[in-house]
Image: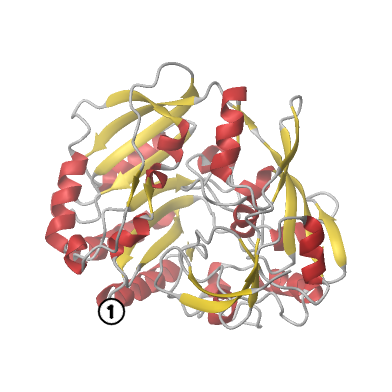
Amino acid sequence: MRWKTTDYTGWGRALTASGDIARPERRTALEAILKDGLVPAIGMRRSYGDAALNDGGRVIDMTRLDRMLSFDTTTGILDVEAGARIGEIAAAFAPRGWLPSVMPGTGFATVGGCIAQDVHGKNHHKAGSFCEHVVSLTLLTGTGPVEVSPEKTPELFRATAGGLGQTGVIVSARLKLLAAKGDVMVVTERRIADWDEFLVRLDASDATYTVGWIDATATGVNLGRGILEEGETGSGLITQRGKYRKVPFNAPHFALSGPIVKAFNSAYYRRVPETGRTVVRPISDFFFPLDKIHDWNKLYGKAGFHQFQCVVPLGAAPALREMLEEIAGSGLASPLAVLKRMGPGRAGYLSFPMEGYTLAVDFPNRAAARNLVKRLEGRTAAAGGRIYFAKDSLAEGTDLGAMYPDLPDWQAEVAKLDPETRLATDLTRRLSLRSAQ
């Protein structure tokens, strides 16, 4: 297997790495690589920070191991390699009446990446996290392949689900797909006037899929205004179809200046009529809206961007409002800000979800924004919440013990599988995750 020395980044492009990358096409080639010792595995690198970076070391690019191996039409169980993309699974099975049970905000995420982060989607309040629908998975460890499942190997499963790839290389998985009514989405959109109304609407919604776009520049009586989308699978004619575009170059510094973002957000808010509307969309347009803009991360320029995403308990909603007030007052937020209500579902020791509200906001990579994100992380810890490793690029690890009380259990299980820390990445080193807290 040939190794190629490459410079690479996470999706946020603010953090970089350089090292040897191999791209095996078959499991036999992958196993040959691992005979010399464990190596971290990566996918499409859609984590925003350094979860998929190993500066100065080697990584295995799993994206060519992307085959859909078998599907049981009776049970809805799909056997698939770890490099398969969620969007491709949705496109292949939606016409047959099935969807991945949980889908993140990009269809480019791989199955292995979704397991390693135990991702959540727009239906978390109904379906829980991704790994709650993983029947079993095949893990290559330092001693060979291991079949992992919640029933037979519960501790190892919980260490692998959301475990950042630290228990071994995920080779394949058996996923329980969700029966769908059709291959389109029926989406109801309505304007939300302010923060208090947003929480009331999220709490009251009984839709299978809900997501809120929030205007993170609005202040005063408009604080927290936005658009709530509620969706159900369906069938019928598509009344709204988006076009795919590509960002051909890095945007200039002023493209995301405060006045421009504020004007864009105001116009975007008004795109939905005051009375609301219901439209029928392609599944990909609803679940993966930014995928229509290839290389959209270039909109932040060469310096890249950081995202802050936290979840706080239901009772800490006032603290989250205070965070939004600080964000809106800073003038630093981009148009990409999302508010969702989460249920309690989580499968792993380090899984992000908890029952509460999650807020995600992107910021250009500037000193003021970096300082703001660090303050917001402190507020999150004080509110009894946690940050999301798939999005983080700035935390220092000081509050992780409180945010993730199962961290010692994860550390103990990981130490058994990888005592020499061969699978450590830039993220686990930055946050000292593999060390006793």
Residue at 63% of width from left, 80% of height from top?
A: 57
Q: Name the residue at the top extreme.
A: 236
Left or right of 201? Residue 62 is right
- Quarter that holds the C terminus: bottom right
Q: Answer with the quarter of the image where residue 270 lies.
A: top left
Residue 228 in sight in this render: yes
Residue in front for this viewpoint, 57 or 235: 57
Q: Name the residue at the front extreme.
A: 2
Residue at 63% of width from left, 65% of height from top?
A: 164
Q: Which residue is mark 1?
A: 367
x%, y% of residue 143? 87, 70
Q: Answer with the quarter of the image where residue 353 lies.
A: bottom right
Residue 219 in sight in this render: no
Q: Secondary structure at mark 1?
A: helix
Residue in front for this viewpoint, 248 or 399: 248
- Quarter that holds the N terminus: bottom right
x%, y% of residue 39? 71, 73
Q: Answer with the quarter of the image where residue 365 lies.
A: bottom left
